[in-house]
Amino acid sequence: MMVFKKIHISSILSSLAALFAGLALSACFDIPSTPDESQKVQNVSIYVKQEGEIDSTLLKIHPQNSAKIYAVVHPDQYSENLSFKWYRESEEDGDILLGSKTKYLVNKKPAQESIPNKLIVTDTEGNSLVTNFEIIINTPPQIDSIVSPQPSDTLYGNSNTSFLFEWVSHDNDNEYYTHTVLIDGTSYVVGEFSSIRQSGFDKGEHTFQVVVTDNYGDNDSSAVITFYVAKKRD
């Protein structure tokens, strides 16, 4: 009887040990995994697209045409699960929400207040990246159509004669701009001057053109003017 009782108690203890081990293992499996709180998006780049041209450096737009502002996130595999909020930030009004889509449309002739300068990208874990930027609204400078000499003009003189070349340009943004004169294909940078004198022309056909460029790289040019040089009349 004593031997039987020892075997019975030993079996009960083994069963209890196995039961507790199973419960412990089951409890281990039921513990939820730690949520992923890591920052998935590492950085955001802002781009501007207008008339098929993409700009990510100056972020410059021309007011006469509509444009799109959009963001590219890195790494890009998380882009579908992100929220985008475009803001106009100012000292007076703080942050004003302008849009919440992946792209922001800028209409023609926009006011500066209608263009965002801050983007907040948020992932599914609530992590956010803030990107500040500034969109430049720039109107290209212009050259008037009337320049001198005019097409088919004949200038009288010889290689020692100094001929006058002049033009009129303007910039609606009142920005600094420079002129480049092309005479017979040779370029002369003349800065802010609106006229020059040039000699050394042989008789015959010659060409003349003016290009005006502002400090944002926008430019305008006159048509290529063909003129002629002939000997002085008696």
Image (cartoon, grey):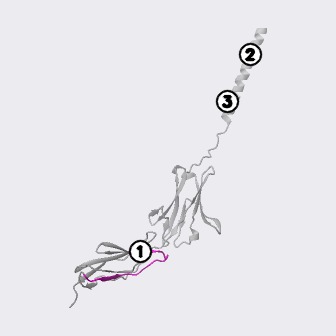
Viewer-side residue, 163 vs 95: 163
Q: Are marks 3 and 1 in contact (CB under 8 Å)?
A: no
Q: Disc 2 on helix, strand or loop?
A: helix
Residue 225 figure quarter: bottom left
Residue behind mark 2: 10
Mark 2 is surrounded, within 10 Å at the Cα level, by few (under 14), some (14 to 19) or many (20 or more) other residues, namely few
Q: Is residue 224 visible?
A: no
Lower position in the chain sequence, tag 2 or tag 1: 2
Q: CA distance from mark 2 to mark 1?
A: 101 Å
Lower position in the chain sequence, tag 3 or tag 1: 3
In the image, the segment drawn in magenta is 160-179
**Quarter holding the N terminus?**
top right
- Residue 47 x, y percent position in the rendering: 50, 61
Q: CA distance from mark 3 to mark 2?
A: 23 Å
Q: Is residue 97 above or below residue 162?
A: above
Tag on residue 178?
Answer: 1
Viewer-side residue, 175 vs 12: 175
Q: Are marks 2 and 1 in contact (CB under 8 Å)?
A: no
Q: Amino acid at mark 2?
A: Ser
Q: Amino acid at mark 3?
A: Leu
Mark 3 is surrounded, within 10 Å at the Cα level, by few (under 14), some (14 to 19) or many (20 or more) other residues, namely few
- On the rendered structure, is 225 left or right of 110? left
Depth check, mark 3 against mark 1: the one in front is 1
The residue located at (58%, 60%) in the rendering is 119
- Residue 127 x, y percent position in the rendering: 62, 51
Mark 1 is surrounded, within 10 Å at the Cα level, by few (under 14), some (14 to 19) or many (20 or more) other residues, namely some
Depth check, mark 2 against mark 1: the one in front is 1
Q: Disc 1 on helix, strand or loop?
A: strand
Residue behind mark 3: 25
Q: Amino acid at mark 1?
A: Thr
